[in-house]
Amino acid sequence: MNLAHPCYDSEAHYKIGRIHLPVAPFCNIQCNYCIRKIKSSDNRPGVADSVISPRSAIKRLKNAVAFDPRIQIAAIAGPGDPLANEATFETLALIKQQLPEMRFCLSTNGLLLKDKLTALEELGVRYITVTVNAVQPEVAEKIYSYVRYKKQVYKGIQAARILLEQQVEGIYRAAQRGFTIKVNSVLIPGINDKHLVEVAKEIRNAGAWIMNIMPLIPVGKFKDLPAPTSSQLKEVRSQCSSYIRQWYLCKQCRADAVGVPGEETCSRSQFYACPSALNLSSTCKVLEQCSNGRVERGDICVSC
């Protein structure tokens, strides 16, 4: 099956470009391995030079395509959860209107996936990546500090149950409606390393196309945990491959990554080395104020 997406198809990985548009700063859960940051040079998910507006995202996309016509995928991957940000839908609508040839994808924790499927379908999103780190609440409660769902904040086992139920149901309904689903799972030694086989079984049954097991990057509350070794990663991927196809080329990209993944390191790459390529001076205005008026310099406010 040729998916023509560089993060789903190994052949496309070296031929087709994508751009992550960092329009979505707010998140509705807190993973213990995640610190969302702006104005950071880290090469990891949840990081961007700035958060930009939907209109600035259109400018950035047009400039990127002019610079490299191989960019065919417009993606939203944070720095927060795209489905928890109205700017995600505004951005996709603008792109659909002005650059209808673009294909769309986004990454999400899955908490709101079931509720947003109709909107995503109408906008023309084809690819959805859902991060699922556990399918048993007893494991998940060690990974998440809280879940904010329907204006309530949940913690512990209750938060884990709500998140897992929404993730699996969202994946199932999305697959039934024809979306191509990739599941990202973070391999966390001592927490879910023995459990990811169960995740593989569950997501296959729910209709996911492929699974991407990523090594833990020790930051946040998990900063003192060891990253998995290459042999640990290889072993878990091998075990899970018995149940669902595996993706091996992930670079754990930033929320503002751009280019052909097989040709760069998922940093800002050559586009950001050349400000004129993306017109950064005019399009990369940092959104310094969250919806409730709080401002967090350096770190993204997650209280909204």
Image (spheres, rainbow, N blue to C red):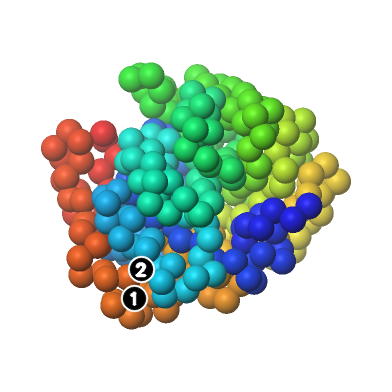
- How packed mark 2 is, by other alpha carbons closer than 10 Å (few <14, some 14-19, many 20 or more), is some
- Is 260 situated left or right of 177 in this image? left
Q: Is residue 137 visible?
A: no
- Is 93 situated left or right of 123 in this image? left
Residue closest to the eye, 116 or 231: 116
The residue carrying mark 2 is: 63
Residue closest to the eye, 154 or 204: 204
| Marks 1 and 2, how far apart at CA | 6 Å
Q: On screen, 15 above or below 89?
A: below
Residue closest to the eye, 78 or 2: 2
Estimate the x, y position of residue 4 in percent, counting from the top left.
66, 58
**Disc 1 on helix, strand or loop?**
helix
Q: Which mark is residue 54?
A: none
Q: Hey, what amino acid is under mark 2? A: Asn
Residue ID at (51%, 48%): 104
Estimate the x, y position of residue 279 in percent, counting from the top left.
27, 71
Estimate the x, y position of residue 299 in percent, counting from the top left.
27, 52
Q: Hey, what amino acid is under mark 1? A: Ala
**Disc 2 on helix, strand or loop?**
helix
Estimate the x, y position of residue 13 in percent, counting from the top left.
64, 66
Residue closest to the eye, 138 or 61: 61
Marks 1,2: beta carbons within 8 A: yes
